[in-house]
Image (cartoon, grey):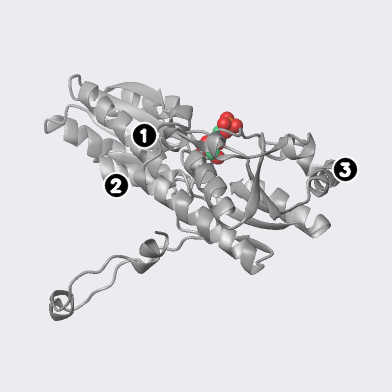
Amino acid sequence: MKNIAILCSGGDVSGMNPALKRFVEYAKEKQLTPFFIYDGYEGLIDNNIKEASYSDVSGIITRGGTKIGSARSKRFMLAEFRIIAKKNLDALEIDMLLVLGGDGTFEGLNIFYKEHKVQFCAIPSTIDNDINGTDYCLGVDTALNVIKTSLDAIRDTASSFSRAFVIETMGRDCGYLALVTHLTSGSELCLIPEIEYEFSSYTEKFKAQIKNGRRYFISIISEGIKQDAGEVAEWFERDVGIEARVIILGHVQRGGNPSVQDRLMAYEFVTNAIDALLRGEEKSVICHEAKGFNFKSIEEVTSKKKVLDVKLLSYL
Ligand code: F6P
């Protein structure tokens, strides 16, 4: 039996627990012994590594966060601690790693591989959706749905008063969460780090809208923009002439019951990552790329019955 371990590092996401469940079940199906490394790279350094069983993952599919903990490890940036980490893996004869995390996690993993050649597969997991090479990172859909629920509630109160609401989403330097929220919530304003903006270009337009009967504004801003939410609210009050309120959604965006998409993505990411390790892939990141839109003739579409996705069927 070969030994395989999994760890979660960086910001937790809803989808990590479903991934842990699939990890234990699929590893066992493949005659591998699964291990959990607790608290990310910190647990790797502190030898907080334990064999995982079915009972460890029973009932966790509905829970956000990660049952095995996560951390942003400063010590793993130092070579001396990476040597200890490697010794801990060797002592347990673990030579395959599954790592869930974001870009900071992957940078550490890359260095660890260069020094110690531990075979790994990395699974993009961050609500920021900011990892190069993949269209989707685990946790994004649940985060967007948490934001959606909050925003729908905010709209109820916003529409009862004459006010502007400035709602800040997470995302670090990436405006993905704010942008998708804007496109799907009907908000009036979206400010993200990727796009230059001037308040003055909105002032007259918004004033005219108030004159024409608009009672309230919903604006979505990403945490990485140059102004903070308070400054955006001040601009609404001072220049547009409407009372404003600020809502920083914060860490609520990282929690919650994992969505169907994140459960399915967790299942597929883990299954394919373990298969890749067993095939001998040494140091890969499993990426998911969406195909986008294309056009087909009406004859082609209506000429055949839709069949179930063969890839999904193969998991049965
Ligand atoms: O990377 C995920 C993320 O939630 C970012 O959107 C946010 O800027 C950051 O982590 C917050 O980090 P922490 O939980 O360490 O405060």
Looking at the image, is mark 1 or mark 3 earlier in the sequence? 3
Quadrant of the image containing the N terminus: bottom right
Q: Which residue corresponds to mark 2?
A: 183
175 vs 311: above or below: above
> Residue at the spot x=37%, y=41% of the render?
259
What amino acid type is highlighted by mark number 3?
Glu
Q: Quadrant of residue 147?
A: top left
Element type where label 2 sits in the image? helix
List x then y, in percent, for residue 251: 48, 28
Quadrant of the image containing the C terminus: bottom left
Classify residue 46 as left or right of residue 29: right
How busy is the neighbourhood of tag 1: few (under 14 within 10 Å), some, or many (20 plus)?
many
For ligand 1, tell me if the residue under mark 3 lies within 8 Å: no
Classify residue 104 as left or right of residue 133: right
Q: CA distance from mark 1 to mark 2?
A: 15 Å
Q: CA distance from mark 3 to mark 2?
A: 47 Å
What amino acid type is highlighted by mark number 2?
Leu
How busy is the neighbourhood of tag 3: few (under 14 within 10 Å), some, or many (20 plus)?
few
For ligand 1, tell me if the residue under mark 1 lies within 8 Å: no
295 vs 235: above or below: below
